[in-house]
Amino acid sequence: MGRDNDSDQQPFILLGFSDRPQLEKILFAFVLVFYVLTLVGNMAIIVLSIADSRLHTPMYFFLGNLSFLDLCFTTSIVPQLLRNLWGPDKTISYHGCVAQLYIYMVLGSTECVLLAVMSYDRYVAVCRPLHYTVVMHPRLCLQLVTVAWFGGFLNAFVMCPQTMQLSRCGHHKVDHFLCEMPALIAMSCEDTMLVEAFAFVLGVVLLLVPLSLILLSYGMIAAAVLKIKSAAGRKKAFNTCSSHLTVVSLFYGTIIYMYLQPANSYSQDQGKFLTLFYTIVTPSVNPLIYTLRNKDVKGAMKKLLGWEIVSKDSRGGIYEDQVYET
């Protein structure tokens, strides 16, 4: 009966931060600023990686995909969020909610795997520099990105139907600012143990396995860096690795907290602010940490803008500058 009652596909009401009306206008400005930063930073990376032939490398191929993911990821959420924060209307159509859930899960899951792919690329560049161009050939790069996208689509096409088919007994108020899986599961009036079990298994595959590979890659990178005789070189390498690991930790830490815990222990307030952090803040700082501080990217920007640039020795490859000279 619950499923029959839910079959009318009525609009959902995204409660968001409506219990804190004094906070909504502040959050509106906060979200808008970070969204603009996300658009500018990630679009700059995509344009530069296409326009400058010096950036036609595996690393920038992966970074271009990451920037595209971040752009689509935030754009699938922010316009609706800004609309809800600015006015009293908090509704989203049933099909809009379904589309947002699918897009959100596809892109989020893909990014988890893509970050692991990028860590493997760094491992090869640092630990096997003489074999880098042989190992990271264009076909393998395309295959790795395809695997990442396939994992994202697989997760969404398994979990989204199960989530949306749960009985809600006529309830359509989502205690969140987007149609997000834990919040939709939490509002169900039936036993969700099977859905939670599926979510946990896929979460382990798409979260813990890539995270383990990332940590393993950086462990090997650290071991290789310790062999560098130059203290300045070791310091630069460790600073760069720590920056990258900071982004990975922020992204994976919040995602793991959100998706690898039982729905009955899920805190809606904590979930809202954590989701706001990894969907709004992290995509805006990724360009800065990964590329916009890099000398090669700065050179590509100057070239694109028509400014005079000084050519430099490229011995060691573009990737070496990215790892050690950010």
Image: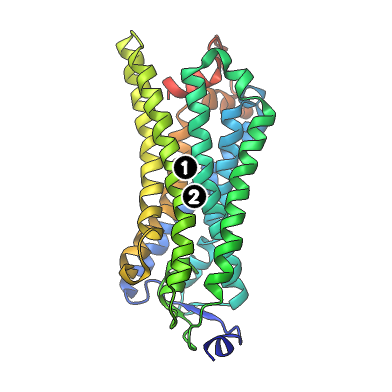
Q: Residue at x 47, y 25 (%)?
A: 123
The residue under label 2 is which amino acid type? Leu
Numbered disc 2: secondary structure: helix
The one of 110 and 74 positioned closer to us in this rendering = 110
Q: Which quadrant of the figure has residue 142?
A: top right
Residue 85 makes an appearance in the image: no
Image location of residue 183, percent across then percent down: 42, 71
Image location of residue 222, percent across then percent down: 36, 23
Q: Which mark is residue 307?
A: none
Q: Which quadrant of the figure has residue 165?
A: bottom right
Residue 219 makes an appearance in the image: yes
Question: Which residue is the site of mark 1?
Answer: 210
The residue under label 1 is which amino acid type? Pro
Q: How is the image coloured?
A: rainbow
Above-or-below relation of 68 to 179? above
Which residue is most to the right? 139
Disc 2 to disc 1, C-alpha distance: 6 Å
Numbered disc 1: secondary structure: helix
Question: Which residue is the site of mark 2?
Answer: 206
Q: Residue at x 63, y 32 (%)?
A: 141
Above-or-below relation of 318 to 82? above
Q: Crowdedness of circle 2 by 10 Å Cα count: few (<14), some, many (20+)? A: many
Image location of residue 319, percent across then percent down: 52, 21
Q: Is residue 19 left or right of residue 169?
A: left
Q: Which quadrant of the figure has residue 102?
A: bottom right
Contact flag, marks 2 and 1 (Cβ < 8 Å): yes
Q: Quadrant of the C terminus?
A: top left
Q: Quadrant of the N terminus?
A: bottom right
